[in-house]
Image (cartoon, coloured by chain):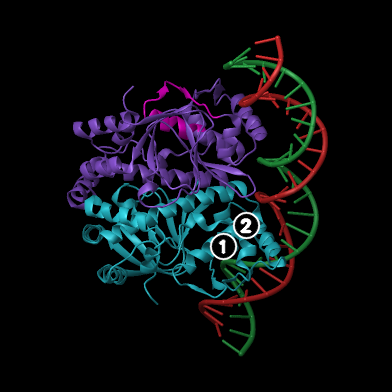
Chain colours: A cyan, B purple, C red, D green
Amino acid sequence: MPNALTRRLEEYTVLTDADRDELARLAAQSTRTIPPRRDLIREGDAPRSVYLILEGWACHYRSLSDGRRQTVDFAVPGDLCDLNLFILDRMDHSIGAITKLKVAEIGRDVFHRVVTNYPNITTALWWQELVSKSIHREWIVNVAQRSASERIAHLFCEMFLRLESVGLTDGFSCDFPPTQGDIADATGLTAVHVNRSIQALRARELVILERQKLTIPDMMALQASGLFNPDYLHHGRLGRHTDRHRHLQSLRDGTYG
Amino acid sequence: MPNALTRRLEEYTVLTDADRDELARLAAQSTRTIPPRRDLIREGDAPRSVYLILEGWACHYRSLSDGRRQTVDFAVPGDLCDLNLFILDRMDHSIGAITKLKVAEIGRDVFHRVVTNYPNITTALWWQELVSKSIHREWIVNVAQRSASERIAHLFCEMFLRLESVGLTDGFSCDFPPTQGDIADATGLTAVHVNRSIQALRARELVILERQKLTIPDMMALQASGLFNPDYLHHGRLGRHTDRHRHLQSLRDGTYG
DNA sequence: CGTTCAGTTGACCATGATCAAGAGTGGTGG
DNA sequence: CCACCACTCTTGATCATGGTCAACTGAACG
């Protein structure tokens, strides 16, 4: 399997061979395995390192004082959690493993060295940061405006496309390990209602979901049913905006890297 | 009035006199006035400049294909909208004026010059970016998990503290220009239900809201009623974490500025 | 002084929550 | 290999929060 991080970042930036080698090194050094349902890091902790997901699914979540919990994003291979390390002093949310997880732990020093020596990578990391902010915005819209079935359809579309961009789909299918309870945490619904809503989607033949495997027979139909517009993912931009790339190049010659 | 942007950024970074002068220049050059209810920039547009709010309130919002709209954040004096300019090629959301707005328009060249020459400012801008991402996370929690009254109480707490951090509160009060319809757009409720929920808060003497003026007689009580925990705003951190500041300094000597 | 827009109130309705129980599935140890 | 346990999924009945539609009031501004 090619490096998922490389694939993600190349969605946006042209990377040199040296960049790719460095990313491969990052992904290889200091890997850890986390059992399912264990927390990687908790709200209030001081971030020690940046985690790169190599295999498995995780979730970013916040807890309320009365015990309610809300997942604010999923993390899949190629995702970095997060750049907070360098700017904020405490985690404002937790990161938990959904499946067994393989992560690369990137310490301050290593990360600093990369940021110093690899300008393309640095720019790409900030791009990833802004895209994930855009995803947050879409999740606000999702839970605030869409009906239960729409929310779930939307989530399926998003995760499928995010996995596709790192090469983890197979035709119309992909792994989908979150339980119905996990989906409930992410969509602001109860597990019972998630169950009924998924059955409605199944009845309309919009999704097949069994044994942690998601199949979307007609992506356009599912997108329509979830009022899904993929623009917010900012995928596939590369090469279409040479003007912007020239501009970014000039930034790099300056201070960004 | 002292420069709101300076106050915001000093929440986090130590700025030199030169930094402050530069921020004052930024806020002074190329200002524009926008009438209420007009869009500053729309979803799909190519961002031309960064906007700095000098006076008034704006909102960031997304529209669904069927006409529904969701506000994903408010912007008040001292807020920058957003750094997308340098990384993403299209706006994934719109920014609309709630009140009459005074903004400074900062073009690419000017912005680039600042980022090149003022490392403290650059770091502080990224801090602002990450804090606003954290605010997005909290809004997801807000609309997904809290009841109508809780959501509105939470919004009041957040906006009051954000205004306080730029010196725009007066004792227990602050301006609060959004209409009940605007609050509905931000909380995923209808205007009718916002009305009834505010009445409930009033009946419990948690807020006084009249003529665009919000008074919070007992902030702790309001926070409790909205399950509000201010940590996610990352305010008032400055000086408490000298270790982190040393680290940031080393970053600045490297590549971040 | 009238027009417009925000705020308010009432009656009724629908989406999704809650509570409870049962069925399917997978993993573990005897 | 089978029995048991835990967890996820499924189904049903009832309830409550908040939505919808419609009318009316009050304040602000030209």
Camera-nearest residue between A78 and A194: A78
- Residue at the front extreme, as displayed: A243
Residue to which mark 1 is pinned: A157
Give percent across and percent down for residue A163.
48, 67
How far apart in space, not on screen, are marks 2 and 1 (Cα)? 8 Å
Camera-nearest residue between B156 and A227: A227
Camera-nearest residue between B136 and B25: B25
Picture residue at 51% right of the left edge, 35% below the top: B155
- Proximity of marks 2 and 1: CB atoms separated by less than 8 Å: yes
* B109 to the left or right of A171: left
Residue to which mark 2 is pinned: A226
Instruction: Give yes or no for residue B170 being in the magenta stretch.
Output: yes
Query: Can residue B224 be seen here?
Result: no
Q: Which residues are magenta?
A: B156-178
The three-letter amino acid code for the residue at tag 1 is Cys
Give percent across and percent down for residue D19.
69, 42
Q: Is residue D6 above or below residue B152?
A: below
Q: How many marks on residues? A: 2
